[in-house]
Image: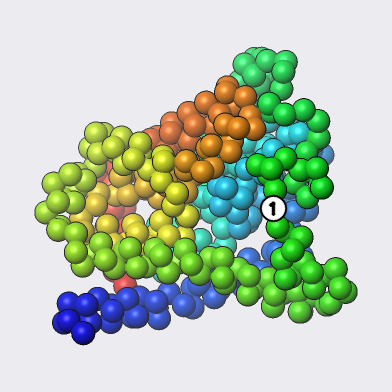
Amino acid sequence: MPEGLLQTTKILVAELWHVTPYFLLGVTIGAVIRTFRLHVRMRDSLGRYGRSAIPAAVFAGVISPLCSCGAIPIFVSLVSSGVSLAPALTLLLVSPLMSPSGYTITAWELGPAWANLKLFSALFMGFFAGGVTWLLDKRGFFGNPGVLTVKGKIDIHAPDCPGELSCNCGDQWSNRLARSGHGKGVIFLAKAWELTLMTGKFTLLGVVVGVLAEQYIPREWIAGYLGEGSVRNVLLVTFFSVPLHVNEISAAAILYGLLGLGLAKGPALAFLIGGPVTSIPAMSVLATMCRRRVVATFLGISLAGTLLLALSFQWAVDRYPAFSALFEYAK
């Protein structure tokens, strides 16, 4: 084996070894949430929260282990069932940004300060999205035709579910075990295995990309284009991240490699937020099922919130060296 490839393999194995405890902790927390259906209970009760629906949606989104593609069917199901647009859109935006496994893996990849910053960003984006959508809805921006381009109530598990929202949740091993009457312990182990497979591939992908980036991307290239936290660089990363299909878990691993190459902190946060929230597959489904004003609102809120957070963060780390030092993390 060539020496360069051998060295890269050793680094990759070491990275995977170190991430394993955090990965298993996140899987365990996620499996508990799924076994007792805590996120489903919160989601299904959004319509009964009244004025507290937006905070409830933020909380449900933070604990929900869903990516953007997985959150869109939930969003469509909610609004077709009569839940107002503000909490539904809040849940759609927050779910891909934060999950228990995403938090623990980010804490390992980038350090607790970055994990807490991502949690704060998810909370901010949720309340920002909920507040803006509520104000627009109150002023009649979305009009009378409603949110969706399809008619009637949509249940993502119904036999007549539209093709864009079809899912195989009922065929999952853990759900088959639950229908067969197995206890919570068995269901928990099945949920944990499913989460291991689902999040494991993103973790592996992110670690591989991060290691390769750190090994082979010239530091001078990163420093020359994205090494400064200028408004131009933040804008560049934000708009570049929009079409990427980056899971929150793989985003943290990729970001670790880029930070090691000299990526500035503001653009780094823009990538950490913008990558998971918007992607071409997710946005195409949303555009198929929803009216244009809803899609434009979601995209506009995502971009505006990302830019506001990234630029504010870059300003803070530039102005306060002690604050910036919290985000200087090395394993």
Residue appearing at x 78%, y 38% in the figure:
154
Residue appearing at x 55%, y 47% in the figure:
68
Q: Secondary structure at mark 1?
A: loop
User: In this figure, which residue is indicated by the disc labeled 1?
Assistant: 167
Image check: 317 left or right of 53? Answer: left
Residue appearing at x 76%, y 34% in the figure:
80
Name the amino acid type tagged 1. Answer: Cys
Q: Quadrant of the N terminus?
A: bottom left
Quarter assignment of residue 329: bottom left
Where in the figure is residue 192, as x and y percent of width and height?
64, 73
> Can residue 52 be seen?
no
Q: Give the answer, above or below, for where 66 lies relative to 55.
A: below
Q: How many numbered discs?
A: 1
Where in the figure is residue 129, as x and y percent of width and height?
56, 34
Where in the figure is residue 203, as x and y percent of width and height?
45, 66
Quarter assignment of residue 220: bottom left
Residue appearing at x 60%, y 68% in the figure:
195
> Can residue 92 be seen?
yes
Q: Residue furthest right?
A: 181
